Amino acid sequence: MADPYDVLEVPRDASDDDIKRSYRRLARQYHPDANPDDPDAEARFKELAAAYEILSDPDKRARYDRYGSAEGFDLGDPFGSGAGGLGDLFDVFFGGAGPFGGQGGGRGGPAGPRRGPDLEVTATLPFTEAVFGTQTAVTVHTALACEDCDATGAEAGTRPEPCPDCGATGEVRTVRQTVLGQIVSAAPCRGCGGTGQVIASPCPTCGGDGRVATDTTYTVDVPQGVDDGSTLRLTGRGAVGPRGGPPGDLYVRLRVQRHPTFERHGDDLVERRSISIAQAALGASLLVETLDGVETLVVPRGTQTGRVFRLKGRGVPHLQGRGRGDLHVEVVVETPSKLSAEEEDALRAYAALRGEEVAPHDEGFFSRIRSAFS
Ligand SMILES: [Zn+2]
Ligand SMILES: [Zn+2]
């Protein structure tokens, strides 16, 4: 089948009205009734009708523009992937690599300017700022629209022109005749890099790309309750695309510093507190640090090591919804490792009262007994 644009003698970006007008003019010219002696006129007239059927239907026209046929799809080259497929791969691999990483791809073409890549940056927060929320500044190497050319890439006073190599479609089609019929494959135009436009005098500031690389600082609102590894997305704060392409998103990955006292388990906090043997046995009242100030913890008589006391609602605020986690204080009974002579006498007296077997106060005692354990 002949190219319907050629048949109707219209450019690829012709409007619907242009197409209709051209069709009427040519149809009058080649109508069989007007050319009774021309045997080719009828064939040409049928060709016109077929071409108009495609270009007057937005769906069929779009399909033709994409695949070179209004009916089917490109069956592809059975011996390898076409250049268009390769363009897809480039987008996947280089899309997030950097502000200019997406340029290798051939996608998008004349359909519109390509979206810029997403960017990622890491922000480190002190523990309590992550718990209660904060504002933090992140600096990111990004691409912004070039102000000198208004992101067109063309020097001030000039504008991009339609690419003559591909008729501003951004694609070059190759038609092959095979036993299965005509196979059309499309590849990005080399003349314009698939954009459908060429710039005769590029903007000196951005070199025709329509954007400039720069370091930009954004203030990020960090909600309360974020944790180490949480990622925030700032929509539209990524790099802009070439020649007026919309921006990607900025992802802020959060690193949260450790706290000297609190260990975080989800939205609960765990704090370990050492108490002495006497405190565990006799009970005690302790002052305990919380995120909201100091609180009193009463350790009852006979508390075992490892016992956990819970302070409700003194943990981390929930990221989703209201309320907070709890603070768990685990008491650890610490065995004294250094005793004064007086303390030792007291302990020995205590052991004797309870009839407990203890090692004698003799430096050589352990060298005479072989322990089965190590
Ligand atoms: Zn510029
Ligand atoms: Zn081109």
Image (cartoon, rainbow, N blue to C red):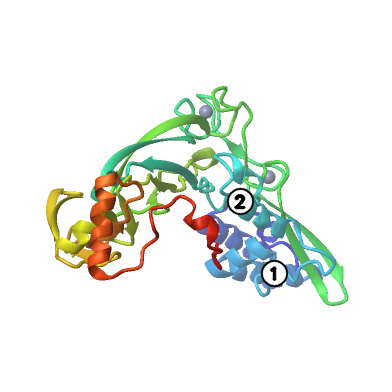
Residue 308 image point, x, y percent: 25, 65
Identified by mark 2, the residue type is Gly
> Image quadrant for the C terminus?
bottom right
Name the foreground residue: 179 vs 248: 248
Q: Which residue is mark 1?
A: 45
Q: Which residue is mark 2?
A: 109
- Say whether residue 318 is visible: no
Q: Residue at x 46, y 50 (%)?
A: 363
Residue 146 image point, x, y percent: 48, 30
Q: Nearer the viewer, mark 2 or mark 1?
A: 2
Name the foreground residue: 304 vs 77: 304
In the displayed structure, 164 sits above or below 372; it is above
Mark 2 or mark 1: name the one nearer the start of the chain. 1
Q: Is residue 112 left or right of residue 43?
A: left
Residue 39 image point, x, y percent: 80, 71
Alpha-carbon neighbours of circle 2 within 10 Å: few (<14), some, or many (≥20)? many
Q: Secondary structure at mark 1?
A: helix
